[in-house]
Amino acid sequence: MLYEIIQSVENGIERITYQPHKQRYQTPIVMQHGMWHGAWCWSTWQAYLATQGWVTHAHSLPGHGKSPMQRNIRLCTLGYYLQFLEAEVKRYSEKPILMGHSMGGALTQWYLKKVSDDLPAAVLVASWNSHEMISASLQAGLRDPLSTIMAVFDGSASAYVMRNPRVAKTMLINDRSIMMLRSCIIK
């Protein structure tokens, strides 16, 4: 193995670090997951980047992955989550590259706008537009209104996957995805 995987849950936040045995770059990468995901979703990226010599840190927001819920999910706004992302970025002596997926991409944009724009780089992976989230939500609602209502009450994408796999596939998975649609179901 070319790297070590370090997993922990400290102060209510799950962290997964991939530490290469031969580190080539000093700048760490902090990875912010999206809605209905956790630190686990970055494992393929982390493994690849570790083989290239990058140290990567993925964390799970409260109520995601192995981070316990700290407040009702319906009260968890982007502003609330931004506090946790800011704390994660501040953990490292070297300013990290910030990488965000989906909702995590919106958080990354908010971080750059509201906290600091002096990071070495930011990477957005299939990101929400931080200023067009209502539009994206409305588009999902038009594709499958009942599942959208169910998702609001359930707090997961399971309704889309169980009720209408074709619609869920267009929203969550593409032909090159490494995860199968059934992997998106939260039990």
Image: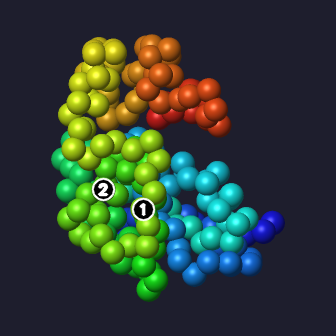
Where's the N terminus, which quadrant? bottom right
Q: CA distance from mark 2 to mark 1?
A: 9 Å
The reply to whether residue 77 is visible in this rendering is yes
Q: Classify residue 153 by image quadrant.
A: top left
Mark 2 neighbour density, 10 Å: few (under 14) some (14–19) many (20 or more): many
Q: Residue furthest right?
A: 1
Label at residue 122? 1
Q: Pointer 2: what residue?
A: 109
Relative height, residue 102 to residue 53 (above, below): above
The local secondary structure at tag 2 comes to helix
Picture coordinates of residue 139 (x, y %)?
Answer: 29, 23
Sequence-first disc among 2 and 1: 2
User: Taking 150 as reference, is 31 left or right?
Assistant: right
Q: Residue at x 28, y 63 (%)?
A: 111
Q: Amino acid at mark 1?
A: Ala
The reply to whether residue 150 is visible in this rendering is no
Q: Amino acid at mark 2?
A: Gln
Mark 1 neighbour density, 10 Å: few (under 14) some (14–19) many (20 or more): many
The local secondary structure at tag 1 comes to strand
Q: Residue at x 23, y 30 (%)?
A: 135
- The answer to whether the residue labelled 2 contacts the one labelled 1, judged by CB atoms less than 8 Å apart, is yes
User: Taking 38 as reference, is 109 left or right?
Assistant: left
Q: Classify residue 10 by image quadrant.
A: bottom left
Picture coordinates of residue 70 (x, y %)?
Answer: 28, 57
